[in-house]
Image (cartoon, rainbow, N blue to C red):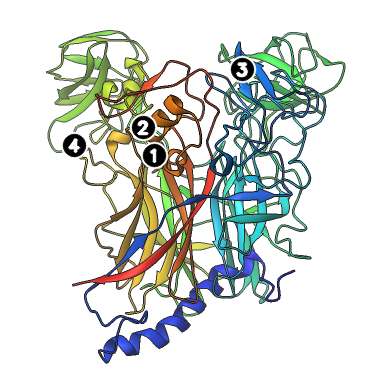
Amino acid sequence: MPRRRIATAAALAVTTLTTLAAFTATAAPALANGQGDGWGHHQHGVLGYTVGTPVVDKVKGGPWTLAQGDPTQGATITVGGVTYPNLAVDPAGTGAVPAASGVTGTPGPLTGYCSSGGATPETGTVVRQPKGTTLPMQPYYFPFVTSDDGGDTLSGLFDYRPKDGDEAVVAATSTDHGKTWKYNGEALEQNAGLCPNGNTNDDGQGHAFVLKVPNYAGTGHSGQVLYTLSRPSGDALGTNLIVHHLTPKDGNPLAGLPAAEPVGQGGSTTVTAPVSVPAGPGGAGVSIAVGSTANFEQPGHFTVHGVTVDCNDNSATATAFTGCTTRTAGGVTVAAGDAVTADALIPATAQQTSGLIAPDGIISTLPHYQGAPKGSVAVLYTEKILNYFTPTTTTAAVTLPAATLPVADSSALKPANGPVTVSLGTPAGIVQVTCTGADATHLTGCTGGTGTVAKGSSVGAPGAAVTPYTQLAAIGEGKNKPKSLYGNNEDYTVVRAAYTTDGLHFTDLGQVSGLGDPASTSASVLRWIGSRGTVITNPDGSYGLFLSGAYASDGDSDAFNQIFYSSSKDGKNWSAPQKLIGTDYTFSALAKQSATGGALDVSGYYSGRTYDPTVVQNDNGSLTMLFAGYSTPKPLPGTGDTYGTNPAARYTVPAAQPAEYRTILSVTLRPHWTR
């Protein structure tokens, strides 16, 4: 253990702010007296940060990693007719390309995830990172990192999320400013022991955040509280975050939590026809007829006869699950009338918050916020509502222009103070239609638009994202499907403030301002705001916020276009976001690596997604920032896909590109003052 042993992550969300406040107490008087800026410079003006060169973080001792190779194979491995190197190496250190679990155009994880090895379907037991290796920190993301010793020792919680396979919360520590991490523990796993075959999902508990609250659950004692998002059921009005009381032990902040704790949508139904379900993960699986598939995640898993059944649902209907296999050796036979249940929204071993509005995750604590009483803890959090801007669909095909639009429910679109303009997808692109009236299932008095609109097409409300598919496709986003408005993401995200005294019950204090516009369609105002960030106290007493965001043209609400900095005097009114580090939609590093071989430039690890920043203050005034990156917006692009915003140098995905996604990176930020 290091000489100055770090406290648990659960105790540090407040401790970090205390350390920063102590730093401010020494630096701010110097500024007021004109003595300097706290870093040895005699300057005044606006505080900003200079970004160093990021590095790919490494981990040792943890669960399976993308780049550890397949121990059952030789120097190379062939997947789908393409041969890849089978190496467990740090690509930036050696120039070699590692064999990642998922390779071009395949579901993942694949090679080497389970003990049988080879390509899917694998069987046996899920393997771990080879003993004694230090490998790129993949597939980890959404870091929550703190320190209680001036940045010498970092304590982190991370989403561990192999694509299409599993999700868990992992704890680790670092003594070199985030470059290398030592695994400390793991908990709340979604699919423990599963060898996946593309027939499940990786939607478990994520977005981990820790608070120390003064009166945990009304006990009169302080408590360390872990918050997670339930991915299957979250991001909707009426849902809240999952809460666990932490009891750290022996350096593991997750000690005492359930090792496995699946979450779902809470559905229940019955089987309507007998069927024998084979053991997985191999084979095509069978269809299971049921009363209703509502409130079951698809693809996903459910329980029948006490065993877990995974269904890929490629052709699922309202009354049938498809592609189903069981995790039980020998399979299982189900009969008509047998009960089928999904995992609970809130596990029996957990609690949930109240008072937060559709929370996607807690961003950071605030030392002070107007309206938060003494003795409470104030936080910023992200409100996120899925598909907010597509509240209904068409119920019949329509040829535009048409005076009437048949819709499933017009209640969110009824004109109140004048006409309403909606967006619809046609084979030629997205068009707008303006309507002056409505009944329960129709918009009436409609004009505008040309082309055909299919039955079941999404109807975009005012403010919907309408970026053309050609623009989305250039960066690897969107879908060439008119019915879905070409894959534009129609979620709603804003930042809100709230406070709590007991860690369970929150009082919402409303939206903050200045960070973006949830209905923006411009290329200069952020539309989507992320759910992981850090607030620090600057030397002049102002607040600094590090967060991520994205424009409408980025096509996703994960807020992955950039990490930005914003400042505030009160925590409510924030300055315009200033980009610190962002994506490279020319994908120049990937193109160069593909053409010449050798190491992938570090920018290639976050050219497609740059998000989830967390910041720690160092004793010398610099900051250590960790963030997550993807090489392309989609984890596993298809062979031959062409990306890039530079028409003169487009990037074509080669056959032997390994997956580089959910990578943790770290970088040093140094403060500077501008006049």
Q: Is tag 1's residue or tag 4's residue first in the polypeptide sequence?
A: 4
- The percent position of residue 216, horizontal first and vertical second, equals 64, 69
Q: Which residue is mark 4?
A: 416
Q: Which residue is mark 2?
A: 489
Contact between marks 1 and 2 (CB within 8 A): the answer is yes
Task: Give the Cα distance between marks 3 and 2.
Answer: 35 Å
Task: Give the Cα distance between marks 4 and 2.
Answer: 26 Å
Category of crowding for the residue at label 2, using alpha-carbon neighbours closer than 10 angstroms: few (below 14), some (14–19), many (at least 20): many
Q: Which mark is residue 135?
A: none
Amino acid at dot 4: Ala
Residue at the spot 37% in from the left edge and 15% down from the top edge: 456
Left or right of residue 10, residue 500 in this image:
left
Contact between marks 4 and 3 (CB within 8 A): the answer is no
Residue at the spot 61% in from the left edge and 22% down from the top edge: 84
Q: Is tag 4's residue or tag 2's residue first in the polypeptide sequence?
A: 4
Left or right of residue 561, residue 144 in this image:
right
Q: Is residue 425 above or below residue 552?
A: above
Amino acid at dot 2: Asn
- Residue 365 or 669: which is nearer the viewer? 669
Task: Give the Cα distance between marks 1 and 4.
Answer: 28 Å
Q: Is tag 1's residue or tag 2's residue first in the polypeptide sequence?
A: 2
- Residue 432 or 48: which is nearer the viewer? 48
- The percent position of residue 551, horizontal first and vertical second, equals 29, 41
Query: Where, by quadrant of the figure, is residue 175 drawn?
Result: bottom right
The kind of secondary structure element at disc 4 is loop
Tag nearer the camera, 3 or 2: 3
The kind of secondary structure element at disc 2 is loop
Amino acid at dot 1: Ser
Q: Which residue is mark 1?
A: 557
Left or right of residue 574, residue 150 in this image:
right
Q: Is tag 3's residue or tag 2's residue first in the polypeptide sequence?
A: 3
Tag nearer the camera, 4 or 2: 2
